[in-house]
Image (cartoon, rainbow, N blue to C red):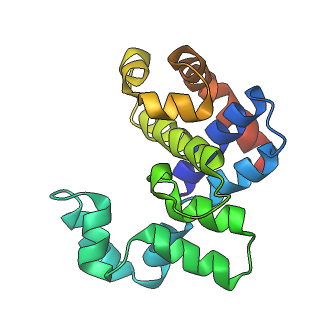
Amino acid sequence: IRELSVVTATAAHGVAERLLRDDKEEILLAGLLHNIGELVLLSQFRDQYGEMARLRDQVSQPAAEKAVFGVESPVVGRWLLEAWNFPDFFVATVEHWPNPWAVHFPHAPVAAIALVHVARWMADCWLERRATDEVYRSFEPRLLSTLEVDRDFLVDQYERLPDQVQQLRTTLA
């Protein structure tokens, strides 16, 4: 979970920086926090988490979480951030990163949520050592449209990830 958070945050910050976004530091933190609900489930319900992980081999992670815990981890993350009085930006991003287009409230930070969504996708691909051409084909058109980028931009960012992850690790050490 930690490695996934660090790589997601790195990818999110890298994209935000290249897009000259004013909120790149918030995007970095949102990337670090995006799967905090999963961490809560693991730390507080270790036995059930193991059961969920085994079930995840047969069904999607959200379905496995719902079957074992009765709730999906992004909702748990939302509850935690609300309890800690985090700003709505982070709460919305943590809850909706798996599907940025499911956000249904005024002034939702859809582009920021989509940015964390694509960063998580890049992190998953990078941690699974997927080839660049496979990653290139995987970006959805509506994601590209929402972020106002093309596939080449995101693939270039994907190829920069190893150096950026190392730089972030050095900074955090």
- The vertical placement of 15 against 38, above or below, is above
State the image coordinates of residue 91 (x, y, percent, origin top left): 63, 68
Tally of marks:
0
Q: Which residue is farthest right?
A: 22
Q: Which of 117 and 110 is in front in this view?
A: 110
Name which quarter of the figure residue 114 lies in. Answer: top right
Tell me if I can see residue 95 in this picture. Answer: yes
Residue 139 placement, left or right of 152: left
State the image coordinates of residue 110 (x, y, percent, origin top left): 60, 49
State the image coordinates of residue 107 (x, y, percent, origin top left): 68, 58
State the image coordinates of residue 12 (x, y, percent, origin top left): 65, 40
Residue at left 52%, top 45%? 117
Q: Which residue is farthest front?
A: 106
Name which quarter of the figure residue 46 lies in. Answer: bottom left
Residue 3 placement, left or right of 166: left
Residue at left 54%, top 72%? 77
Tell me if I can see residue 7 in this picture. Answer: no
Residue at left 71%, top 48%? 27
Residue at left 19%, top 66%? 55
- The vertical placement of 149 against 173, above or below, is above
Residue 14 placement, left or right of 58: right
